Every structure is written in C-alpha cells, then in structure tokens.
Amino acid sequence: MVLLIAWSALPATLRGQESDSLLVEVRLAGVGRLMLMAEPVGRSLRLPAEPIFALAGRGAPPAPAATLEELEGLLGITVIWSPRQLLVTLQDPFATLPSNRARVDRLRAEAAGRGGGAVPGRYAGWFGGITMDDRREALADLGYALGWAQARVSHSTISGTAWSASANPIRPLWLSYAHRPVGGSQVRARVVIPHGWVSADYRGRKFGVDGAATLGPVVVYASSRDRFAVTWRGAVDVQVGHAGNRSAVRVSFGPVDPSPISMPMVY
C-alpha cells in the first residue's frame, strides 16, 4: 500500500505516463521567441499570458493564462499553431504590437540616415519601372543606386528622355536635381522628420512645399501644388496618385523604393 501511494505521487513523466503539457516555442518575427509550457485544449492551446504580453510589449494581461483564440482577441493579431513543429507564431504584418512597432521605427530611422527616407530602403543595385496613365501614355525608367547617391534616366512617349541625380551628403538631408525636356530643371531638398518628411523645391521660378507621413508599409503624400499619392512598399511597389485632372498607377521593382513625394505620371 505504501509503495502504491508513493508511486502515484510521482510526476507523470517519471511514472512513464504521457504528460498533458507541451513545451512549445512562441515566436514574434524580428522581435524574439519564448519557450513555454502549454496545455492542450481541443485543437487549441492554453498558454501563460504574462510572458507573451511582455514579448508583445503590452502591459499586464487580464488573466494569468489564455487560449490561442483569446490571445488573438486580446492582442489584435493572428496566432498560428503548428503542432508538428510545436510552434506558436504571432503574426503582426502591420506592426500593431508595441514591440514590433518599435523594431520597425528603428529600421525606419536607420534607413532615413542612409537614404533620406522614412521607410526601410534597399539602396544598392539597379532599379526601374514602367508607368501608364489613363491616356494610355507610358514612361519607362532605369537607374542605379550606390549607397548615398543614385542616378536615373527615363523615356516618355510624350516628352522624350529625361535624367536626374540625387545624394544624401549628411543625415537627414537629401538633395536632388532633375532635368526634363518639358518643364526644365528642378532642385529639391528633403529633410526627414519622425514618421515622415517635408520637402521644398524650386522649379520654374516658383517654390513648392510637400509633405508625407508613414503608416506601416503605406506612405501618404500631399503637395501645395494640388497633388497627392498613396504608396504601398513591398516585394513589388505600387503607387496610386492624382494631380489636377490626371490619375495614374505605377508598379515597380528593384533596390530603390519609389519616391512617395513624387506622384506617378507620364510626362
């Protein structure tokens, strides 16, 4: 009888029986990972909430433990359970969690110092794209970026060939010069500010002021010249813009992100 009581008091793993708990990895890409004990609940899991909230950069959780579905509701993200890998993935593509947003802000700040932009950039190699507008006119461009400077040449079905060059001599200042057959030359200076930038330019004996703000991968741009553009930056960059009575969309690729302070157009 004494031996039976002692045997039943041993942990399940020492008695050779399967434990109900699982050791799983909880991962938030780019931020960190945790190893936690989880309790299976049907096809879901119940996990300690406090370390997960700390990983996400949130305050104290409302309860000491939460299921995967409850975590989705509390954190406002998607939680993926991969049983074969014993992996719980916290998917936060729009950087809504404070810890992930802080990581993205650091990347933006680093990119701003390198290239005068507030969104992480890819600043070495060839880049180019094709633009078409609602008149079925087109423009093709090709350029090369080398760290702190880049050059670009373009050809339009309307105005012919143009060229431009830009440089980032000191952070957070970006300078550029462009020459077009139609409209002449333009000189521009851009200064980076938190979560955006402001720009001033001189063209045709007139000054203009532009501004932009970022929200995750999206950049919204507006100008004193009655222009606006919305830019989505990703593996393939997409821009939609409007100026005066013209609208255009641009799809592009390459190591240099499209400038969100210049709306897509065929000129």
Image (cartoon, grey):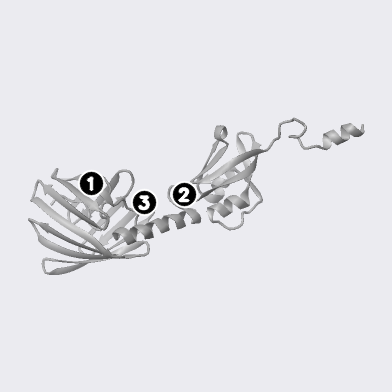
The residue identified by callout 1 is 126
Residue 120 appears anywhere in the view: yes
SS at badge 2? loop
- Helix, strand or loop under label 1: strand
User: Which badge, 2 or 3, comes first in the chain's sequence?
Assistant: 2
Disc 1 marks which amino acid?
A: Trp
Q: Are marks 1 and 2 in contact (CB under 8 Å)?
A: no
Of pointers 1 and 2, the one earlier in the residue sequence? 2
Residue ID for mark 2: 30
Nearer to us in this view, 207 or 50:
50
Marks 1 and 3 in Cβ contact (< 8 Å): no
Marks counted in the figure total: 3
Q: Quadrant of the N terminus?
A: top right
Q: Amino acid at mark 3?
A: Pro
User: Disc 1 versus disc 2: distance between alpha carbons?
Assistant: 27 Å
Q: Nearer the viewer, mark 1 or mark 2?
A: 1
Give x and y (percent) for residue 208: 20, 67
**Residue 10 in the figure: left or right of residue 52:** right
In the rendered image, is residue 117 in sight? no
Category of crowding for the residue at label 1, using alpha-carbon neighbours closer than 10 angstroms: few (below 14), some (14–19), many (at least 20)? some
Q: Secondary structure at mark 3?
A: loop
Q: Nearer the viewer, mark 1 or mark 3?
A: 1
How far, Cα to Cα, is label 2 from label 3? 16 Å
* Mark number displayed over residue 236: none
Q: Residue 72, how many percent across, how many down?
A: 54, 46
Residue at left offset 76%, top offset 34%: 14
Find disc 3 in the rendering and name its residue: 217
Q: Quadrant of residue 2?
A: top right
Crowding at label 3, few (<14), some or many (≥20) Cα neighbours within 10 Å? Answer: some
Return the residue nearer the eye: 77 or 3: 3
